Amino acid sequence: MTVLRLQLAPQPSPVEPYAALLDGLLDSAWLVDGTSRCILAVNKAAHQMLGLKPEQMVGQAVETLVSTPEDAMFWLEAASSTAASLNSDTLMRHADGQMLWVTRRISYVALNSKAAGMASSVYGAEPAGYWLVVIRDQSRQRQSEEEREALVAELQATLESTADGILVTDLAGRMRSFNKRFASLWGIPADLLQERNDEAVQTWMRRSVLDGKIYAQRLDAIEEAPLLQSSDVITLTDGRVLERVSLPQFSRGRAVGRVYSFRDLSEKLAASQRIDELAHSDMLTGLPNRRALAERVDYAQAMARRESIPFALLSVDLDRFQQINETLGHSYGDRVLKEVAERLKSCLREVDTVARLSGDEFALLIHQADVRGAENAARRVQEAMSRPFSFDTLSFTVTCSTGIALFPGDGGTAEELMASAERAMHWVKESGRGTFHFHRPRKDVDLLSRMRLDHAMRQALQEGQFRLHFQPQIALGSGQVIGAEALIRWRDPLRGEISPGEFIPVAEESGFVVAIGEWVLRQAVEQAATWLRQGRTMPVAVNVSAMQFQQSQFVDSVAAVLKSSGLPPALLELELTESILLRDAEEALLRLQALAELGVTMSIDDFGTGYSSLGYLKRFPIQRLKIDRSFVQGLPGDSSDAAIVNAIIQMGQALRLQVIAEGVETEAQREFLLRAGCHEFQGFLFAPALDPRAFEERVWRRSPETPVRSVGMHFLGGLLV
């Protein structure tokens, strides 16, 4: 009998339909048994995301893949409640150990009766259902967000680190971002900024401006021109002055908004005003100083020429004033000077001027005065000074010597008139003091001495008796030698060393200073060119007299010297006196522009002692200001010198000019200048003016091939070594 064996068809797995469904999902998906919480199926995206093979996941307890306490707690609760669900961001571990940021959703899927029966026939038990775990990898998105947040934080930190107030708007003028400095400058309440109430903020700013109507009109014009670049000065109702710079903001080649930067100019303007005040007035007495007097004399000259009315200039110097300082002290001396200032003012009309020129030297400008008028003024001065001075329990008398110069007979310029008045005053000093004297031509012996000196100078130039010394110029910040000033020296075979302070004034009076200046320029440029050919880059600074600068061929001569030597123009600096800039401002501007086109550097020498104007400084192509040694000597103890130096440095910074101080002799002076923001210095602290060989030894000692800019200063125990 034949027995038939029936071959039963294999039973399909109850999860196969779900597995096929899982593979259709783009996100990583698991199917977890509701009872045992073992993984029954995973899709391709799941093992790719975690770096595990399917067999490493299927059949595993879901707790083995848990990476956070949150998941562990969920699966503990899921054992007793199928109503639990989870949807949150979490971390999972890749097979290589890297942590992944994911968004994970877990929900329960109940089986219908047919599916439950099928599962029962396969597993021998009837499962309640399955847990569906769907996971989306957010690592790249999270990384991008973190990078974006870091970039935003960096940009915000950059905005907050600037000293300017920054406001960024869109094309419609709506605020997009700002920094704290912006809110501080405008005093905008925090609640307005937090609310991002653009209208309220704009109203606040408009009300804070002195002229709100003009401010609003200008702002409308800026917003109507998306590509406009602008710079405006805004005066606030509290007196502060802000500079507003507006630039378009671009993204992918098109304008998307506007960036406003606001800078408080109040301190700089106050410093400039203070400089102007210091430049025109005496700190102790409050009287006009030499510079202010010169300007008033120039005005008086213009009036006198137009109306043919003379005026007088009196030079008044106290007799034996040094004895007061030495016996009673400088405090008493200052009290005397203040009292003298008041007495001299009482001798004049309101239209006249009394100025303090130096320690105990004063000057009086008497308008519409002939010989008789000048004499009457001098007698009033003598009478006022004849009254005793009484301070505390002390009483004493101070006399004065007065010299008188008349315009136009005794000089055609302020300098000439003052020189004439001072010569007359010195004649009084030599004749016994305590009276006045009109200017007279120089004594024959004086003229003869100057004639002999002038002749000796001309011979010295022909015979090669002049020589150049070079004083190093040092960068305060790094201590590097950044240049050298060329200074003329003269040793006469009979007289020995003759100071430039003695022969240069004679050369200026005779006009021979032009020839001397040309020789200095040529020699200094040749020396710098020689150093350059040796591989040593050393910029040189050359002093230019007013008369030399005014020569019609001056620019051409500078160009010719540079060309013949082969020295790059940038290595030549011309130091100009302040008086150069005022003789003929327009002519000076043209000449300076021509020099700037050559490529040479220009600076103002002995700044603060002459008659320069801030307006001219803005117009002329000047790169450096040199603080006169007279202001450096008292540093850091003299408050007046400190105030003047600080003001000059601040003004130089505001005008974007390099500032160099001369005559620095002590470490304390150097430290003060460094703290004040001065850029460079020269003086005996580093080295005096040296002949070329000594200069080379000082600057390039030990290593002749070393570039100049790598040579630094080292201070040890307060001494330069």
Image (spheres, rainbow, N blue to C red):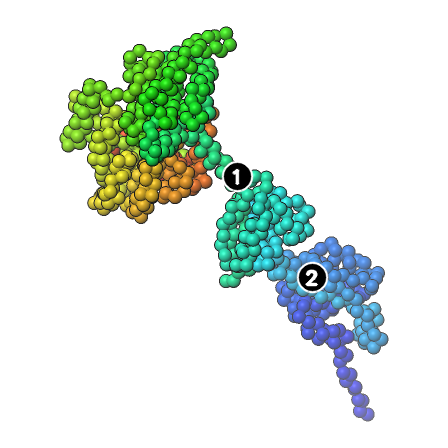
Q: Quadrant of residue 534?
A: top left
Whole-angstrom CA distance, mark 2 to mark 1, is 55 Å
Q: Position of residue 683 (x, y in %)?
A: 35, 29
Q: Between label 2 and label 1, give the one nearer the viewer.
A: 1
Q: Position of residue 40 (x, y in %)?
A: 74, 69
Which residue type does callout 2 highlight?
Thr
Horizontal relation, residue 458 to residue 390: left or right:
left
Q: Earlier in the sequence, mark 2 or mark 1?
A: 2
Q: Is residue 483 among what the camera can see?
A: no
The residue lying at 59 percent from left, 39 percent from top is: 238
**Mark seen at residue 682:** none
Compared to residue 550, the image places residue 396 above or below, namely: above
In the image, 624 versus 18, the foreground residue is 624
The residue lying at 67 percent from left, 64 percent from top is: 136
For the residue labelled by badge 2, is the local secondary structure a helix, a strand or a loop?
Answer: strand
Residue at the disc numbered 1: 266
Mark 2: give few (<14), some (14-19) or many (20+) Cα within 10 Å.
some
Mark 1: give few (<14), some (14-19) or many (20+) Cα within 10 Å.
some
The residue lying at 56 percent from left, 55 percent from top is: 220
Which residue type does callout 1 highlight?
Ser
Q: Quadrant of residue 408?
A: top left
Q: Quadrant of residue 530?
A: top left
For the residue labelled by badge 1, is the local secondary structure a helix, a strand or a loop?
Answer: helix
Compared to residue 645, the image places residue 53 above or below, namely: below
Q: Position of residue 71 (x, y in %)?
A: 74, 58
The residue lying at 41 percent from left, 42 percent from top is: 618
Quadrant the C terminus occupies: top left
**Mark seen at residue 103:** 2
